[in-house]
Image (cartoon, rainbow, N blue to C red):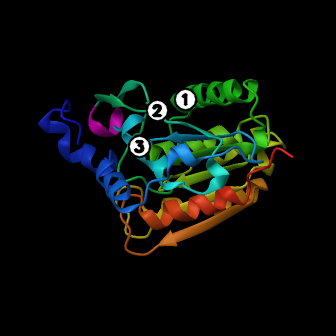
């Protein structure tokens, strides 16, 4: 947990602000590291992978994720791990912590209240990050947005409201952060972006039912979604999920030719 949070907030914070550094440290220790000096130019075009962390976490703490993606297709990948601004969070009694938008209750269920005003502000900031990368020369088809928990919910909203078709979006242990009426606002181009949704069946922070609600919602909006359930997995990400994400993105990357 983050040491700056007072003890009175530790218990509610523990439910949703899961620190993944232990998982990623295991990944770093268990995976062979690529020889950077042996890399040579290939036919793959530049790609961009944006990772959005969960409540109370930080971007730098999630950077070890990229070390798992050792396939040649990721040689020209640009990774971004931004940190959420510090904001008071209702579900943690107003404690100020890194948070993309406000969350009203934990555990998060399929019917939890939604704070769309703060969500849309966060979406606009994500759009600026994507716009900047596309302006730098990355093809939108090679842009991938991924996120865990609160970052997964923000991924869903940001991609569905973006005015271009992207390479893909991956939601881990996330939920639908806006009301169904928002479907009318999804640009036709956004609906062509494919989704990968992964959720642990033992998740007691963002309940599995919240994850299960995602694919039907996307199907109603006309969006393609692959849903993967992980028995026994709690509110965390494991190596199996990240390995699958690597292959999922790899099959969608566009070459420079």
First-in-chain label (2 vs 1) = 2
Numbered circle sitting on residue 62: 3
Helix, strand or loop for disc 3: helix
Image height check: is 160 above or below 252?
Answer: above
From this viewpoint, is residue 240 visible?
yes
First-in-chain label (3 vs 1) = 3
Q: Which residue is mark 1?
A: 122
Residue lying at the far right in this picture: please name it: 257
Residue lying at the far bottom in this picture: please name it: 231
Q: Please state the horizontal and vertical placement of residue 244, each as a whole percent of the image.
A: 56, 65
Q: Please state the horizontal and vertical placement of residue 39, each as a whole percent of the image.
A: 60, 47
From this viewpoint, is residue 178 visible?
no
Q: Which residues are magenta?
A: 89-93
Residue lying at the far front in this picture: please name it: 38
Q: Residue at x 47, y 50 (%)?
A: 67
Q: CA distance from mark 3 to mark 2?
A: 15 Å
Q: Residues within 10 Å of mark 2 (few under 14, many from 20)?
A: many
Question: Are dots 2 and 1 in contact, CB under 8 Å?
Answer: yes
Q: Residue at x 70, y 43 (%)?
A: 41
Res 233 → quadrant: bottom left
Numbered circle sitting on residue 34: none
Image height check: is 233 above or below 25?
Answer: below
Q: Which residue is mark 2?
A: 100
Q: Residues within 10 Å of mark 3 (few under 14, many from 20)?
A: many
Q: Residue at x 46, y 44 (%)?
A: 150
Q: Please state the horizontal and vertical placement of residue 106, each as a whole percent of the image.
A: 35, 49
Helix, strand or loop for disc 2: loop
């Amino acid at each position: 947990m983050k040491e700056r949070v007072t003890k009175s907030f530790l218990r509610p914070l523990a439910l949703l602000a899961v620190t993944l550094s232990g998982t990623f440290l295991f990944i770093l220790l268990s995976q062979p590291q690529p020889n950077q000096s042996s890399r040579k130019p290939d036919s793959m075009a530049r790609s961009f992978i944006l990772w959005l962390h969960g409540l109370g976490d930080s971007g730098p703490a999630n950077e070890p994720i990229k070390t798992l993606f050792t396939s040649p297709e990721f040689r020209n990948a640009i990774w971004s791990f931004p940190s959420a601004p510090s904001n008071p969070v209702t579900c943690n009694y107003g404690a100020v912590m890194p948070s993309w938008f406000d969350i009203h209750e934990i555990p998060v269920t399929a019917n939890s209240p939604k704070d769309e005003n703060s969500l849309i502000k966060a979406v606009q900031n994500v759009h600026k990050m994507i716009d900047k990368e596309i302006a730098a020369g990355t093809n939108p088809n090679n842009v991938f947005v991924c996120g865990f928990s609160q970052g997964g919910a923000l991924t869903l909203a940001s991609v569905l409201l973006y005015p271009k078709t992207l390479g893909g979006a991956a939601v881990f242990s996330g939920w639908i952060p806006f009301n169904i009426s928002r479907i009318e606002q999804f640009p036709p181009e956004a609906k062509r972006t494919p989704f990968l949704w992964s959720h642990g069946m033992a998740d007691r922070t963002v309940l599995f039912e919240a994850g299960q609600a995602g694919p039907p919602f996307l199907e109603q909006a006309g969006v393609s979604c692959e849903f993967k359930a992980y028995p026994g997995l709690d509110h965390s990400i494991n190596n199996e999920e990240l390995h699958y994400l690597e292959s999922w993105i790899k099959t969608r990357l566009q070459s420079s030719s």
